[in-house]
Amino acid sequence: MQRARFLAGWVLLVVAMVALAACGSTTDSGGGDGAGGQAAGGAAGGLPKLAQKDSYTVCFPQTEENNPWRLAQTASIKEETSKRGWKLVYTNAAGSAAKQVADVQSCIAQKVDVIWLPPREEKPLATAVKQAKQAGIPVFLLDRNVDQSLAKAGEDYVAFIGSDFVEEGKRAAEWLVKETGGKANIIQLLGTSGASPANDRRKGFEDAIKGQSGMKVLASQDGDFNRDKGRQVMETLLRAHPDVDAVYAHNDEMAIGAIAALKAAGRKPGQDVTLVSIDGERAALEAIVDGELGASVECNPRFGPKAAETTLAYAAGQTIPPKIINPDQFFDASNAKENIAAAY
Ligand code: GYE
């Protein structure tokens, strides 16, 4: 009798294993979404649920703190969580995707309620997003996205909240075409390699100038969204391409670095070289007023209120759209001055 029960148990186990294998479970380790393997607090087959509580513990693993945009984003998150009396687990990955993955894992171990993640790079952080889901912790991606072939909104994470980076690149290109009369020899300073805003801002810009035979990209190089790297890359590219008369930088910091490199080489930014970039930080608005930077497409870093509202809506059981796009302004000589006071 006991032996029969033992055998029956084995048969059941084998059947269950075959059924699981047939589900074609891919990269997920352990758990899975099937009955019994469901993550703690997880909705069957879907995203982890979030309980309605008076206070939440929010994990915010920042990518780095090396520019005004990042500082403004962190300040907004700190301000919002403290205003609401929520607990914040904040870390700084100091420019390392590997450290940011470890920071997410540490938040999982601490059993935070929710993770607000700005994934530094699209691929490495997709795995961390899946690990959080497995642990039953909902993730909201702030400002940067993950590779959509590796992790998806509504399945692996709740939603992406941020700007439309392709559109930002397109707006920068359209301004440059107009400003240069459709004739420009361009150096493109790329954002962090593997980061969604770098990929998308490049795509938006390059697609928009495709039909314009007078718009030539002489060179494109990674400046890591960083002022000093932007300056160094510009210095090198300037020697190789002295015929440059336009710069498209994926963020203001690199544009400001490029302005320094151009001046050091005896060029006149704003006169013999037209520059356009993205973010709308205070130093960029000042450079526009000084006539050195032509324009900056806004990319709003103040995510705190939207992240908190969306988190509460999710806890209340509302349907969250997979992409929540921030509306962005555009700054040029016509409005830079009046926006300096509110800038970061
Ligand atoms: O443009 C840049 C920052 O991810 C959209 O990251 C953000 C970008 C922003 O380092 O300045």
Image (tube, rainbow, N blue to C red):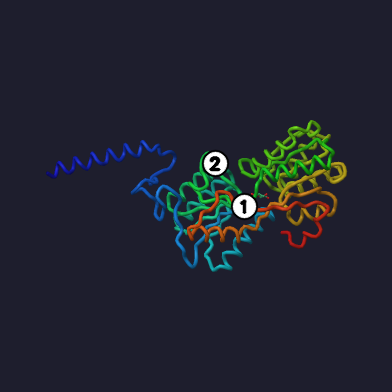
Q: Specify whether 278 is left or right of 80.
A: right
User: Alpha-carbon distance for marks 1 and 2?
Assistant: 23 Å
Q: Specify whether 245 is left or right of 131.
A: right
Q: Answer yes or no: is residue 90 visible.
A: yes
> Residue 35 has which mark?
none
In the picture as drawn, the residue positioned furthest to the front comes out as: 319
**Mark 2: secondary structure:** loop
In the picture as drawn, the residue positioned furthest to the left comes out as: 1
Amino acid bearing label 2: Gln
Q: Position of residue 251 (x, y in %)?
A: 71, 47
Q: Specify whether 209 is left or right of 105.
A: right
- Residue, disc 2: 148
- Residue under the image location 75 percent in, 32 percent down: 211
- Residue under the image location 80 percent in, 39 percent down: 177
- Residue under the image location 74 percent in, 62 percent down: 342
316 and 163: which one is in front?
A: 316
Amino acid bearing label 1: Glu
